[in-house]
Amino acid sequence: MTISTRLNTYLNDNKVEYNLVAHPHSFNSLSSAIAAHISPAQVAKAVILEDHEGRKMMAVLPADHKINLGALSEKLNRDFHLIKEQAVYKMFNDCENGAIPPIGDVYNMDAVYDDLLVESKDLYLEAGDHSSFIHIERKDFVKLIKDAKHLRFSHLTIH
């Protein structure tokens, strides 16, 4: 298991207690949740967006949800689109490709968090690889995202 060095430093600096939870290697947050026998609603995933002026933003939502770009663009008065994967890989160079820790401040990035994330007692975050989660309590997650925007901008994915 490997935790992003930036994420580890950030959590330690903010005095957040966490546990690393190993799971079989997977390729996305939803399959990681299933592999770890964790409800996907408790797993926070990050999606990197760019607006019409080239400003980047991290949108964080439950792993079993999809982002509604139209709703988010309207609520924030910006025109968002998904950023190209190759650009994302460069931005998160201390992580395996696609295993983005969902805390914007770790990467000096503006972030917006779906309100659904704070409904669970415990949350699981990508640690920076495809084989482990960081498990934290809701109170610590709320502390970490207290200065970020909170909205409803996702919908449940049907599987």
Image: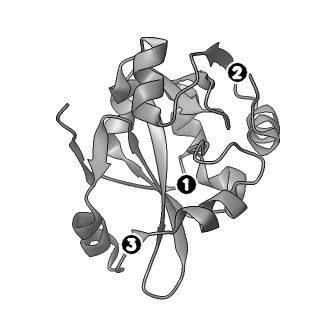
Q: Mark 3 or mark 2: which comes first in sequence?
A: 2
Q: Mark 1 or mark 3: which comes first in sequence?
A: 3
Marks 3 and 2 sit apart, C-alpha to C-alpha, by: 34 Å
**Picture disc at residue 81:** 3
Quadrant (top left/top right/bottom left/bottom right) for the C terminus: top left
Sort mark 1 into few (<14), some (14-19) or many (20+) by Cα contacts within 10 Å. Answer: few
Relative to 8, is 35 on the left or the right? left
Of badges 2 and 1, nearer the viewer stands 2
Point 36% across, 80% down: residue: 78
Quadrant (top left/top right/bottom left/bottom right) for the N terminus: top right
Can residue 121 be seen from the camera position used here? no
Farthest-out residue, top: 37
Residue that carries the numbered disc 1 in the rendered image: 147
**Picture disc at residue 87:** none
Residue that carries the numbered disc 2 in the rendered image: 17
- Please name whichever residue, 27 or 67, is drawn nearer the observer in this view of the structure: 27
Question: Element type at marker 3?
Answer: strand
